[in-house]
Image: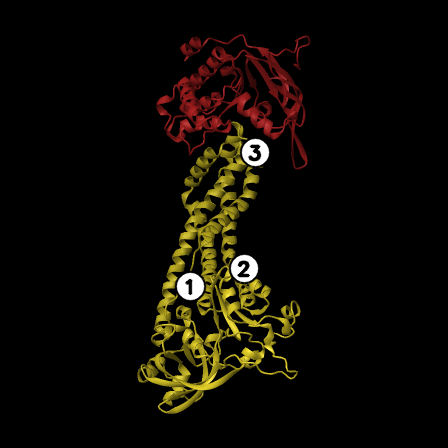
Amino acid sequence: MASIPAGIPQTTSVAIRSENLCRHYRMGQTVIRAVDGVSLQIEAGEFVALLGSSGSGKSSLLNMIAGLDHPTSGSVTVQGRELAKMTREELAKHRLHVVGMVFQSFNLIASMTVLENVELPLRFAEVDRSKRDALAREALERVGLQARMNHRPSELSGGEQQRAALARALINRPQILLADEPTGNLDSRTGTEIMDMVREFNSKLGMTIVMVTHERALAERYVERLIFLADGKLVGDQENTLAMSSSQARSEL
Amino acid sequence: MKIPDLTELALRNLRESVLRNSLTTVGISVGVASLVAMLSLGSGLQQLFSRKLMKSGLFDTVVVTSRRDLRGMGREQERNGPTPGESRVLDESAREQMEHLPNVLEADPDIRFVAKLLYDDKPHLTMISAMPASMKSNDAFEGMQGSFFSSETAPEIMLQKSFAEELLGKTPPLGGAEPSVAELAPPLLGKEMILSYPQKVTAPSRTVPGPNGSAADLASASYSVVSREQKLKIVGIVDLDPESMRGPTRAKVFLPLKLAESLHVMQSTDLREISEAASDQPVYSSLSVRVKNPAQMQPVEDAIKKMGFTTFSILDASQSLRRVFGVLYAFLAIFGSLALTVASIGIVNTLVMAILERRREIGIMKAIGASDNDVKKLFFAEAGAMGVLGGVVGVLLGWAIGQIINFGTNIYLKSQSIPPEHFWAVPLWLVLFAIGFAILVSLLSGLYPASRAARLDPVQALRYE
């Protein structure tokens, strides 16, 4: 059982820290322990993969870090703030400013153009209309999608949609990017493109990245640290020695 | 989220399912239209009635009598103030004083007397009254034949329809068809009648020795009554109701007011004032004081009461009429609101459906940072936008319905040979009220869906496909 190694001082460089974190669901008579006593610590700037089969609790853990879900017990602290004690309003602010999220199914709003999707968080953040457009264009340029910004998500390929989702996740300049199976709906080539981009955010922008995936091979190519979950419990936590540079990863294809 | 953003997103969402949202909006429009239709009917009817009543002169006239004539014995206003014996005489100086009260248009004496009229050498005894020129604008003269008096002093006369019938010997049997004014007029207009009346002539001042040899002040109070005749030309036949409440119309024959005054006809009430008329001033049994606006009736009435006279007006009647219209309004509003209530259920339904459909979208918005409040406000804005659109369209629709009904009814009225009326009015307050009410109802309807959308669990919503 991996737990927080003793002696690591709690400094401000800790991005995410959970202690005995539990998330239990009640389904009829049975209690499902989706997350069951997970304690871990992720440093600022780390690129971490949460690995495990489906139902291992990796997405539930990610949702709690994202502030989308409330822990049943235990604590989860992100950027020094305890999420379990936050009000719903504060959690919304957390999702808006502290973390950015991307999903397997992209989760773009179908009725809006790419540009509108990307600037939507700015509306929630009440950023002035005049600044919004420039910020959204800038984010789209960063993911190489400026040419398609007036298209609707349905007119885009999966890779393009995920890039748009990445741009949206970045728009409020969060310190942490949470990715839930970001390549799950993509072929390996576009998946690699997305992963390259994510790694760039990590290396160039210094973002802390937590990625949920069940593809161990993909994770091993990119991340610095692998955390294994099974049945809601932390079953492994190791440095990834196999991580390649982006150029290596590309040549492998 | 800021309000412009909310509005923009709400309108965008409404456009996304155009058909459903337009149907809901149409529902609101119909509700508002029925409310507007009902209330504008009420408002139109009220305007029609008050217009008619105003013209009838019932509501802008205060009838003033002297306390001395004891007519209002026992009434409350009689119990306060001086006793009848000590109170003021309703004479010319009092009339002038009343005419100079603020908001008073005119104060005319009510001159009514019974006299003999000769037509074709046949005598006809009837009630005659003097009519001020201002009566010309009265509604009652709409159906008259001939013309109103050419001047206030012209030796002219107008006949009430039933008197015209009497003159021509055409009195219809009870319940039989009445001849129309137009039938009666031609043989009478321009003809002459002779009025035979008792004239009051004030005797020259002389001293009457009193019982104790003292010269009483009765000197100027003596007068004699002389029989006189006056030629009059028939200029008009009118169809007034002789039983109507307004003083001057309660007669069968009408004289111009100034002419009637100059005749100094002996009236029955003069007898009572014999001992009081301290001067040559004419004394009146009653005065009709017309105010500029029925709203100013009360202060004028109060002022006259303060002068020491008895007043009577139909203000009380108009107040109860207002109450009747209040009840009518309430009823019409309730019926009109029913459709709007149904429409509000439509809004709830539409928005709840929208939540189900847009569950995932709500989940996404929450995941990227929308607060419960943002989601709530967004649904609220959608409800409000439907309310605004429905309200505006509904007012237009209601107005159109009103115009059509008014048009149709007037065609019917015309077929019944009744002059067309405008009994439909959509005042500005109604427009604003209807739109405001539509927005209010929509927002209330949006309360439940909005809070439901806000409470949605984002994790579950995102799992939902």
> Of marks 3 and 2, which one's residue comes earlier in the chain?
2
Task: Identify residue for label 2.
Answer: B330
Badge 3 element:
helix
Q: Where is residue B452 in the image (x, y as percent from the top left)?
A: 57, 40
Mark 3 residue crowding within 10 angstroms, few (<14) / some (14–19) / many (20+):
many
Residue ID at (42%, 78%): B254
Marks 3 and 1, how far apart at CA: 50 Å
Task: Identify residue for label 3.
Answer: B372
Disc 1 versus disc 2: nearer the observer: 1
The chain carrying label 1 is: B
Marks 3 and 1 in Cβ contact (< 8 Å) = no
* Chain A shade in the render: red
Q: Position of residue B399 (x, y in %)?
A: 40, 56
B134 to B428, vertically: above or below: below
The chain carrying label 2 is: B
The chain carrying label 3 is: B
- Quadrant in which residue B79 is drawn: bottom right
- For the residue pair B36 and A205, the one nearer the viewer reads as B36
Res. B423 mark? 1
Disc 3 versus disc 1: nearer the observer: 1
> Of marks 3 and 1, which one's residue comes earlier in the chain?
3
In the image, what residue type sits under mark 1? Phe
In the image, what residue type sits under mark 2? Ala
Badge 1 element:
loop
Marks 1 and 2, how far apart at CA: 18 Å
Q: Which residue in the rendered view is the most extreme toward the front?
A: B213
Disc 3 versus disc 2: nearer the observer: 2
Badge 2 element:
helix
Marks 1 and 2 in Cβ contact (< 8 Å) = no
- Quadrant in which residue A97 is drawn: top right
